[in-house]
Every structure is written in C-alpha cells, then in structure tokens.
Image (cartoon, rainbow, N blue to C red):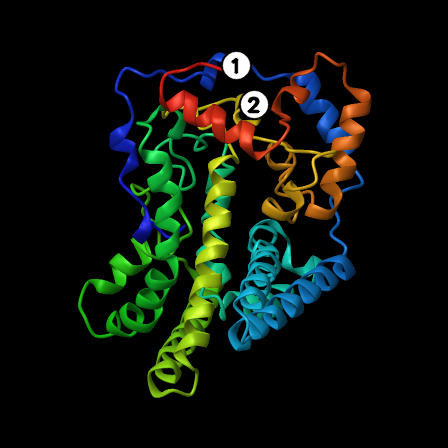
Amino acid sequence: MNSSLALNLRDTAAPAAASRTGSRVADDKALLRAAAEVARDLHRPNPAIFWGDLTVSAVLGYGALFVAATASSTGLMIAAGVVSMLALYRAAMFIHEISHMKHSAVPGFRLGWNLLVGVPLMVPSFMYEGVHNLHHARTRYGTVDDPEYLPLALMKPYTLPLFVLVALLAPVGLLLRYAVLTPLSLVVPGLRKVLIERYSGLVINPAFRRRAPEGEARTHMLIQEASTSVWAIALLTMAATGIIPLHAFAVFLVVVAGITLINQVRTLVAHLWENEGEAMTVTAQYLDSVNVPPPAMLPALWAPVGLRYHALHHLLPSVPYHNLGAAHRRLSSVLEANSLYHKASYAGLPGLVGRLAASTMGVRR
C-alpha cells in the first residue's frame, strides 16, 4: 500500500502492550540448518514458469476486464470483473518476485512485467524494489524502520477495518501521484523530495521515509515513473474526452480497487503483527509470519505466487515462488512433529482474521 494512503496507526497501539515474540524467542538452529539444507537446489528460478504464469495471468485479466467493461449484462460484468481482479492480482504479485530476484536469472522479466502490469496498473516495480528488501533485514523487521510492519495485533479494534478499507482509495491515490504530483514535482520546489520519500513505496508504515535511489536504480525509477505518469495522464485524458467511455473507466478503477483490497486483506494475515518495535531473531520473525499450505485451496487465489508460504519465504527469501511448495514438503517430512516449523502453519483466512481481531480486543487465542 502506498504510504500516501496509510493511516497513522502506530499511535493507536495500546501503550502498555508488550511484544509476544521478539528477542525472547531464541533462534532454532536445527530449523534454520534444515531449511538451508533442503533448499540447496531450489534457488534457481525457472524462466519458462515465470513468463508462462505472468503471460496467462495478464491475458486472462485484461481479457476479462474488456468483457466487464463492455458487458450489457450486470451479472456478466460482475463475473468478468471478479475474474479480472483475481487474474491481474496474481500478475501484479510478481512485483514481489522481482524485488528478490537476480534479474540476469530471468532476462527481461522486470521490463516485461512493467510493460504488462506495472505501468498499466500504476504500480511500477521501483515502488517495491529497494523497499521490500528492508522488510527482510535482520535488524529492521518489526521495528519502526521496517516499511512493511505495524503492530496491528496490539492496536485498537477499529484500526483493522480502517486498514483494509483504505485500500479502496488506491486508484485515486495512484492517479493523483502519477498524473498530478509527478509532473508538478518537476516545477514545485521541495515537492520532488517529498514525493520520493513518502509516495514512492508500497509500504504500510507511515513513519517510513524512502531514500532516493542512486545509480542504476535511479535510472530505472525515472524511466518507470515517467512511463507511468504518461499513461496516467493519457488515461484521464481519454476518459475526459470520451475516447474511453466513463463506464469502462469506472470498471477499470473498480478492478484496481478490488486488487488492492484483496492484497490488503492478504497483508492483514501475512504476519501475526505481535511485535512492538524490538529487533527479533530470525526464528521469531518466522513465528510472527504465516504459512497457509495445502490442503487449503482458497489461499491459491488470495495469496498467489508463493505468498501462501510467507513464513517460509522469510526463512528462504531467495527461493523463487514456484519452489516454495517443494521446500515446505521437504521440511515437513524431515522435521519432528513438535518442531517450531509447524507452528507457523494455519488453516485459512477466517481463523487468522479472527485471531487478529481477538488480539486487538485483548483476547489471547
């Protein structure tokens, strides 16, 4: 979520609340060693899987979007809109893989993803690259310096619906960021600095300030930002002049809002959010994160591209999404039933949301 849409939620945490994980959990050396050993041959991404998955998801998503925007039947419009949301959501989630991968391993994928998804949906990859990696930094996770962490479990109950519903404002915020603020930042003194620090990252921590990218990263950012700005201005112009019917434009905005809403709900259960600012061991970070492995089937829709193994990803961040299932099966087979590894696995979305909601109300589960 863009920081421009983030709520100042840290201030709503109960001041007396204490971390339930943090440094009190020592690193489980056997678990860390087993994870490293089972994944020795799983770190290489498969370009055919990456390109095939992205292409099918994008084609299905935009095809369904066209049907939804042109349908004469309300039922067909809704059905196609849902298919478009889920398919484009899956395509969009490759931004997570891009932030971790060596780009030489899948040549041209970052460029292809930005052309197919990043620019059209106004979430170019620079908004995650150079930001998400800080979330994995050993001394940053769960602290005020983590761009993707808030102690949601320790906050007031009303923060959860606000956290989710604010995502519906994303299309408006993205259009404002790229169609208005980007060109203005070229002529308004000081705006450029603010734009980079506060409105150039997909973050949930409103206290986070991004450093300006340098070198090659800066070049990629400028190209992607300019491309997205041109697209956003063109999109608004075409909608205003009738080239794109207002109905079709509205359907596009609803689909984008739906994508961000689904992702915000996923984010809500990606961690347990029980740390209040202290540095955590790797094992504590793992236990504060969530796996939703098979046999549950719905996570394949709301946590696609490997995100159903989010806790495992924090143990093995360089393993590509298509190999996380294999890593999970191997670890499950070699570790004892009482291993901490199994404590990060949950049955599904409802139970996780219920646990988080109960925590905000002071109920331990």
Mark 1: amino acid = Val
Front residue of this view, candidates 340 and 132: 340
Q: Is residue 95 above or below residue 357?
A: below
The 10 Å Cα crowd at callout 1, few under 14, some 14 to 19, many 20 or more, is some
- Residue at x 58% of width, y 63% of height: 84
Q: Earlier in the sequence, mark 1 or mark 2?
A: 1
| Left or right of residue 231: residue 60 | right
Left or right relative to 116: residue 338: right
Please state the horizontal and vertical placement of residue 89, each as a whole percent of the image: 56, 56
Task: Identify which residue is drawn at 29% across, 43% down.
Answer: 7
Which residue corresponds to mark 1?
25
Q: Is residue 16 left or right of residue 152?
A: left
Q: Is residue 357 left or right of residue 94?
A: left
Q: Secondary structure at mark 2?
A: helix
Res. 358 in view: yes
Kindly indicate the quadrant of the structure image that contains residue 68: bottom right
Q: Nearer the viewer, mark 1 or mark 2?
A: 2
> Which of the numbered marks, if any, corresponds to residue 287?
2
Tell me the CA gap for discs 1 and 2.
Answer: 9 Å
Residue 333's place in the image compared with 116, above or below, is: above
Q: Secondary structure at mark 1?
A: loop
